[in-house]
Image: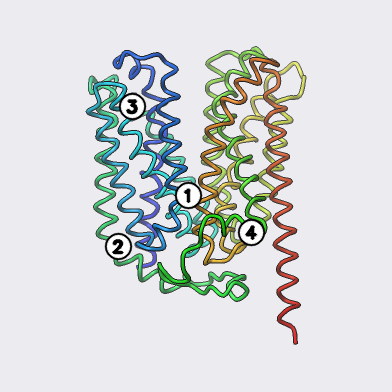
């Protein structure tokens, strides 16, 4: 039962990655068919991001009431309906309308599923699951390309992914009884060292009471990890959007070569998470976060070095991707240990909101900065984000360590 549900969750993560690249891959054709400027893609992505942030913040209350299984199934169903809606949209306002359930479904399922895995599965699975998400995100541009070249049009790509999501919804509904059983039995070898301190053993949905947003934000260390998560997601999204332009404008790299290595940044994240899965249980989340930020910083430094050859800069982009790989899964997986199982859903929901805020705001912010200072500033911008993420994650480690020592002293006779 435990392994079968894990297999379903792996499939869910692939499917969840599929819609994330569709707008970017299809927009060159979509905006022409809809008769709107290229810049209107930002409107769609902002609506999706807004819905995602709202549903992430509400995920704790909803998941505690209905359980992770039901929330995941309903959210994937909501996303499937939105994608089918995209496929029948003949005007821009219809895309904006269907972008609302698209974002609401994505945020709720992301928070619920990540918390469930953090509570019930080993660290290696968190890394591998996010690697599978990257696989899904990498596949969707090919789906869009095939749909456009085969005559199905961009609507065919959305319809295809929508059908895949609908099938997954049916599978999740059938699997609902498994979620409750896994909830009641912790996986072999998995413990939460802070359970005793926080008074929260493995518990079914609804146990322990609702943790309000304001209360979660007052937990020592939450604001620190939110800043680290914001910095990481800002680093990732800014690199994805602007790295290719930087290589062409500042390093004189051929456009095709720059595009290929920019895609290798994403492949580095996906492959790095797969490799990190083999180390996660032995190394631990704290060390993975530290190693990830440090390696990403090394990659950014390689990107900035003023040398004649472009090889170092191109390799630096790949190294930065490998460094980014374990940070997101490790932050999520460490949440129950850092803040207690009872509060983990609330904290992860806020973390998801911080993640989407960073991903949404940082790329256009760098666009403004580069318009004023020049594209050369990209490595400096990325270095600031790396330093902020590393500094905040290390501060959290100190806070958690101090709290643990204080709790051990308090339990001594």
Residue 19 figure quarter: top left
Mark closer to the chain start, 2 or 1? 1
Please say if 70 is above or below 12: below
Q: Nearer the viewer, mark 1 or mark 4?
A: 1
Which residue does the image show at 52% across and 16% down from the upper left? 256
Which residue does the image show at 52% across and 54% down from the upper left? 348
Is the residue marked by circle 1 packed among few (<14), some (14-19), or many (20+) residues within 10 Å?
many
Which disc, if any, is residue 284? 4
Identify the residue under disc 3.
144
Mark closer to the chain start, 2 or 4? 2
Residue 218 figure quarter: bottom right
Q: Are marks 1 and 3 in contact (CB under 8 Å)?
A: no
Mark closer to the chain start, 1 or 4? 1
Mark closer to the chain start, 1 or 3? 1
Q: Nearer the viewer, residue 240 or 80?
A: 80
Q: Are marks 4 and 3 in contact (CB under 8 Å)?
A: no
Is the residue marked by circle 2 packed among few (<14), some (14-19), or many (20+) residues within 10 Å?
some
Q: Are marks 2 and 4 in contact (CB under 8 Å)?
A: no
* In-image side of 342 versus 303 (left or right): left
Q: Nearer the viewer, mark 2 or mark 1?
A: 1
* In-image side of 70 versus 197 (left or right): left
Q: Nearer the viewer, mark 3 or mark 2?
A: 2
Q: Gap between marks 1 and 3, in whole Å?
A: 31 Å
Which disc, if any, is residue 43? none
Which residue does the image show at 45% across and 57% down from the upper left? 60
Identify the residue under disc 1.
57
Estimate the x, y position of residue 268 in percent, counting from the top left: 56, 37
Mark closer to the chain start, 4 or 3? 3
Q: Are marks 3 and 2 in contact (CB under 8 Å)?
A: no
Q: Nearer the viewer, mark 2 or mark 4?
A: 2
């Amino acid at each position: 039962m435990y392994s079968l549900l894990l297999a379903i969750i792996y499939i869910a993560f692939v499917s969840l990655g599929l819609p994330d690249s569709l707008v970017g891959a299809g927009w060159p054709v979509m905006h022409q068919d809809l008769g709107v400027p290229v810049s209107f893609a930002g409107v769609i992505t902002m609506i999706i991001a807004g819905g995602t942030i709202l549903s992430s913040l509400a995920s704790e209350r909803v998941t505690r009431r209905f359980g992770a299984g039901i929330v995941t199934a309903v959210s994937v169903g909501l996303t499937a309906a939105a994608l089918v809606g995209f496929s029948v949209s003949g005007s821009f306002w219809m895309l904006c309308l269907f972008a609302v359930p698209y974002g609401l479904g994505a945020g709720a399922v992301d928070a619920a599923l990540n918390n469930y895995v953090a509570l019930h599965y080993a660290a290696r699975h968190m890394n591998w699951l996010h690697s599978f998400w990257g696989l899904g995100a990498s596949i969707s541009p090919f789906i869009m390309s095939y749909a456009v070249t085969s005559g199905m049009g961009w609507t065919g790509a959305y319809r295809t992914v929508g059908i895949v999501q609908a099938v997954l919804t049916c599978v999740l509904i059938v699997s609902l009884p498994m979620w409750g059983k896994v909830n009641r039995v912790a996986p072999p070898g998995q413990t939460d060292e802070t359970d005793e301190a926080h008074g929260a053993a493995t518990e079914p949905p609804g146990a322990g009471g609702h943790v309000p947003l304001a209360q979660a934000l007052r937990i020592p260390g939450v604001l620190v990890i939110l800043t680290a998560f914001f910095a990481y997601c800002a680093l990732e999204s800014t690199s994805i959007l602007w790295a290719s332009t930087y290589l062409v404008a500042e390093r004189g790299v051929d456009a095709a070569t720059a595009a290929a290595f920019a895609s290798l940044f994403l492949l580095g994240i996906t492959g790095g998470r797969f490799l990190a899965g083999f180390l996660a249980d032995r190394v631990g989340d704290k060390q993975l976060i530290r190693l990830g930020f440090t390696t990403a910083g090394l990659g950014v430094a390689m990107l900035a070095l003023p040398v004649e050859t472009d090889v170092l800069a191109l390799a630096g982009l790949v190294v930065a991707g490998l460094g980014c790989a374990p940070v997101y899964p490790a932050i999520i997986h460490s949440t129950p240990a850092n803040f207690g199982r009872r509060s983990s859903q609330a904290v992860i929901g806020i973390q998801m909101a911080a993640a989407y805020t960073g991903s949404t705001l940082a790329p256009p912010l760098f666009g403004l900065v580069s318009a004023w200072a020049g594209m050369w500033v990209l490595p400096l911008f990325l270095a600031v984000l790396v330093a902020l993420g590393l500094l905040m994650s290390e501060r959290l480690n100190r806070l958690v360590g101090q709290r643990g020592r204080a709790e051990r002293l308090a339990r001594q006779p």
